[in-house]
Image (cartoon, helix red, strand yellow):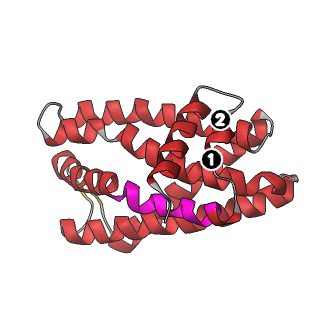
Amino acid sequence: MPSAQEIIAALTGSVKVAQRDPDALRYFDLSADAFWRSFTAIFYALPFYLVFITAGWRMGQEAGVALASSLPAYALSELFAYASLWALYPLAIAGLTRTTGLTRNFAPYVIVYNWSSLLIAAFMVPPYIFYSLGLVDVGGASLFIFFLFISVLAYRWILATQVLKTNGLIATGIVALDVGLSVLLAQLLQAMRGTGAT
């Protein structure tokens, strides 16, 4: 398990990436062991995802979208997709870096990507909390989420250019791959649940 010091340093480094700090990588442990430890970020981000799931379920109900037969069923399917994405994305990136000659930077990229996912989860959670507290309606929350999501895409693009040390075009493809995998998993889950607008 990573130490508290390693986690704090990695989160600090994730912020430095957003600031385009050329020394951002020095905040990360880039060893082989640290590569595997970075995957524990999935557990630290889990509380945020539980907020996304429960608030997302209520938002779907209010918007007239049948997400699943019940909240527990919806939560299980979303957690499955969450875990699947954490497993599939590094595999997809491994293939892409091999194809583009960026293999040397694969491990640092995954380490930074994993830890920054925790930062992004915290960044994305406010509209879900505001909705749950009744401070915004589903329309306001959705608009807030959309603008935050655009910011996350920009951040992922910066991360790819800085850590993989690649050009903007390849970085755009990497971000598209990230989004594409998420959309594909969402579509598969929707097909399995047989859900949609009501």
* Position in image of residue 109 (x %, y %): 68, 50
* Position in image of residue 44 (x %, y %): 39, 57
Helix, strand or loop at label 1? It is: loop
> Disc 1 designates what residue?
28
Residue drawn 42% across and 29% down?
147
Q: Which residues are magenta?
A: 34-46
- Check disc 2 and give the amino acid type: Ala
* Residue 42 lies in the magenta-colored region: yes
* Spatial separation of the CA atoms under disc 1 and disc 2: 8 Å
The secondary structure making up most of the magenta span is helix
Asked if 100 appears above or below 142 in the picture, the reply is: below
Asked if 73 appears above or below 172 in the picture, the reply is: below
Q: Is residue 154 left or right of residue 5?
A: right
* Residue 112 lies in the magenta-colored region: no
State the residue lying farthest toward the right. Answer: 101
- Check disc 1 and give the amino acid type: Phe
* Position in image of residue 85 (x %, y %): 52, 63
CB under 8 Å between discs 1 and 2: yes
Can residue 186 be seen here? Answer: no
Crowd class of label 2 (few under 14; some 14 to 19; many from 20; radius 10 Å): many
The quadrant in which residue 82 appears is bottom left
Helix, strand or loop at label 2? It is: helix
Residue drawn 18% across and 31% down?
136
Q: Looking at the rendered structure, which numbered label has been put on residue 24? A: 2
Crowd class of label 1 (few under 14; some 14 to 19; many from 20; radius 10 Å): many
Q: Looking at the rendered structure, which numbered label has been put on residue 123? A: none
* Position in image of residue 127 (x %, y %): 27, 36
Viewer-proximal residue, 113 or 38?
38
Residue drawn 36% across and 36% down?
145
Q: Is residue 39 left or right of residue 124?
A: right
Residue drawn 65% across and 27% down?
20
State the residue lying farthest toward the left. Answer: 134
